Image (spheres, helix red, strand yellow):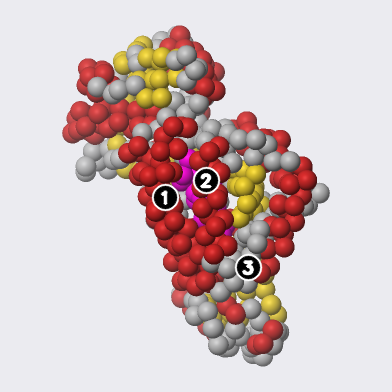
Amino acid sequence: MSSTATHDLDAIATAAAAAAEPFAATDPRARAAAIVAIADALAGAADELVAIAERETGLSEARLRGELNRTCVQLRLFADTVVDGSYLDVRIDQADPGFVLGPRPDVRRYLIPLGPVLNFAASNFPFAFSVAGGDTAAALAAGCPVIVKGHSGHPELSARTAQIVAEVLDAAGMPHGVFQLISGQREGATMLKDPRVKAGSFTGSIAAGRMLADIAAARPAPIPFFGELGSVNPVFVTQAALDERGTGIATGLVASVAGSAGQLCTKPGFVFVPAGHGLDAVIADAAASVPEHRMLNQRIAAGFVERRSAILAAPGVRAVAAGAVRIDDDGHGWATPSIVAVSLADLIAGRDELLDECFGPLSILVEYEEGTDLAAVVPTLFEGNLTATVHAGDTEDTAALRALVRVLTGHAGRVLFGGWPTGVAVTPAMQHGGPWPATTNDSSTSVGTAAIGRFLRPVAYQGAAEHLLPEPLRSANPWNVPQRLAPMGESDGWGAASR
């Protein structure tokens, strides 16, 4: 993918800025119809797009078809979100001369689009977190023009997907400049500094994400930047769970680690299991049946080789399933899953070598002794994570288990029970974010309908005439959106519910 020329960057930013106001003012049903049309067009081009993605990324056809379907479902979900209108969070305080604190004016508040959004596409999800992925869908749904910085790992796919999206939006009558693609790392950083860009989103490494977040914060007028960065997604298995379904936990672990060659932000990197668990043979057998899988690109493969070697060489580490990495003549890596084990004491002693994320098909079993206070261990080892998982007995309910869940709630955006964190459902309630370094903003999500809130800001109108109000705030409610009303006279009863 060739880099975007400097003069083109200016033209692209100019077009996005010019599109911002008319796009924000589009009727919600028209915007939703355009988003659904994107989903339909992508689905219709599935054979072409999947073939390109398979060639460029090495991901399997089945995985890519499933991911493209998820992308289309995600777009349709956001279309319904736009039509529903709840995301606007409309609040209306009626004028009240008898308000308890003195006469209250008519105040009406809702959320408006931020303006042009710069979305940095991810390498490991060439559909769901790339050109037409979740960040793009959420920003378009919010009414924001989108500039996508395509990923160099799938340039042909990026260009073709962008062409489809742009053609659909043009045919739907959306403003010129509402969706555009740029390329080049330097060009992405340059665009992030442009004052016409009002927000940024990113999925990738901690180093790159932190650099971009710092650029966004250092602008003369700082802008919101929503980065999804690193996560090791710890898993905790109790003795009761091990006794009830140890074999299933072992095979589920291998499947979760091996999927897409472990190149998932939700891959379980550390699995705490009781010492003497007896799962080695089951894990080794399950891992041995997994065929080698190509990694996304040469850089990721080289990084995995280096990180895997360092982990295997760390004191106290034993290989349960050694796995392997084969580098072909083009420098691409082909890997099978590696599962290693270490005692909790050795993990603590070797934290500098072991705790960093390993992006690829490798996971570390952490063997803990009976009576270990896992709730106390978590904050000494881990920062923020996208997920944390608990495998407990079906009826297990102890003070230690409850304490562990409380601690994990403070360290992760999603706490799972009895499952595996790979696989993120596209649903209204999904939370895909977490405390640093999982994300740069732990109050947001990049999956689910709440993701739209990243690209909106609140504004209130006080004492405005009906005809000067935006449609969602009018008493006539022409968009038929939910409106939360604070009626005249209600302040006299405040506090009664707590009595």
Residue 408 sits in quarter: top left
| Residue named by callout 3 | 24
Inspect the image, locate mark 1, and give the three-letter code of the amino acid beneath it.
Ala
Q: Is residue 139 magenta?
A: yes
Disc 3 is placed on an element classified as: helix
Inspect the image, locate mark 2, and give the three-letter code of the amino acid beneath it.
Arg
| Residue named by callout 1 | 45
Give the magenta range.
Answer: 126-140
- Which numbered mark, 3 or 1, is in the foreground of this view? 1
Which residue is located at x 41 percent, y 10 percent?
316
Instruction: Give the image location of residue 21, x and y in percent.
Output: 68, 67
Marks 2,1: beta carbons within 8 A = yes
CA separation in Å, label 2 and label 1? 10 Å
| Residue named by callout 2 | 160
Q: Is residue 43 above or below residue 60?
A: below
Q: Earlier in the sequence, mark 2 or mark 1?
A: 1
Q: Is residue 158 above or below residue 240?
A: below
Inspect the image, locate mark 3, and give the three-letter code of the amino acid beneath it.
Ala
